[in-house]
Amino acid sequence: MAGHRMDDIGNVLGNWFNYTRRSVFGPLLASIGNRDDFRRKDDWNDAAPWGNRSWKNRIPAGLPVSYSMAILAACVFVSLLSLIAPSFVYGYLALNPIYVMQRPWTLVTHMFVHANFDHLFWNMLFLFFFGVELERRVGGTRFLEIYMLSGLAAALGQMLVSTGTLLGASGALYGVLGCLAIIAPEIRILLFFIIPLRIQYAVVLFAFMDFLMMGTGDSIAHAAHLTGLLVGLAFGYMMRNQPQVYYNY
């Protein structure tokens, strides 16, 4: 009798184990190693094969990924770094014309360095409004080309009239403004957040003020502003007859 009971208990346990393995652990084990195809999900706008997509398209829709926002983030990072290692940031990332041959990278890195919070805030506010708009109209690659070449030209223009240390994104941002003034003349801005003004008139006003202030020794790179603006205007004239295409970010 005892042997039959043990056999019955063994059969019950065996049947329960087989049922549990099939109904519970079977699907769970089968799913291990499988990956959901997130490209088919509604929150992914691009259903193209993964290998054919750029690095920006591999990030779910809804995240503000663009070159203008990447530049903004880099400027904020460098400003935070300047609080920790000011001698490194202002010595090896800012542009000092005396050491430009020994530190040629500063022709680029100076655009990410800012003197203080006010300098950073106003430049990044400008980048947020006008940089994003230009990138939306011309695309990321062309925006980056305009931004960087305007910044490089601004640095060279400032070095022609001054040997002082140069830092900040203003020259590049003037290039952004100049290009927008040509390809999007319908844009209106609020001067001092109060006075509505067409973007072309704002460009003329800013250029006139920079020209008047040159040589005043106010520690503002007016020559850099004007040079960057000229590069942006040149890009705008080259692109003004191209069809308007709007890029989503």
Image (cartoon, rainbow, N blue to C red):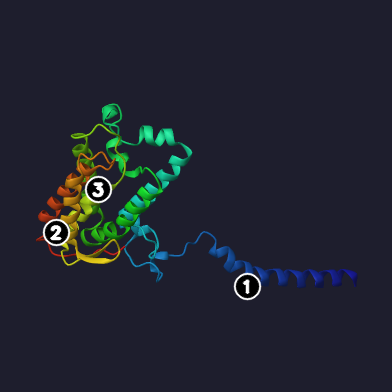
Where residue 228 sits: x, y (%)?
20, 46
Residue 53's place in the image compared with 213, above or below, is below
Mark 1 or mark 2: whose residue is earlier in sequence: 1
In this view, the mark in front (1 or 3): 3
**Horizontally, is 154 left or right of 11 in the view?**
left
x then y, percent, for residue 187: 20, 66
Quadrant location of residue 100? top left
Question: Does residue 54 appear in the picture of this structure?
Answer: no
Residue 155 in the image: above or below residue 23: above
Could you tell me how far apart the alpha carbons at marks 1 and 2 are, in whole angstroms? 67 Å
How far apart marks 2 and 3 lie (CA) works out to 16 Å
Circle 2: residue type: Ile
Q: Residue at left 16%, top 60%?
A: 201
Q: Residues within 10 Å of mark 2 (few under 14, many from 20)?
A: many
Name the amino acid type tagged 1: Ser
Q: Is residue 49 visible?
A: yes
Residue 162 horizontal side relative to residue 123, left or right: left
The first of marks 2 and 3 along the sequence is 3
> Observer-nearest residue: 243 or 13?
243
Screen quadrant of the N terminus: bottom right
* Residue farthest to the right, as pictured: 1
Do residues under tags 1 and 2 come within 8 Å of each other at their CB atoms?
A: no
Secondary structure, mark 2, is helix
In the structure shown, which secondary structural element does the residue marked by tag 1 occupy? helix
Q: What element carries label 3?
A: helix
Residue picked out by circle 1: 23
Q: Name the residue under label 2.
A: 182
Give the side of residue 201 with respect to residue 74, left or right.
left
Q: Name the residue under label 3.
A: 172
| Residue 231 percent location from the top left of the image | 16, 48
* Residue type highlighted by circle 3: Ala
Q: Which mark is residue 83?
A: none
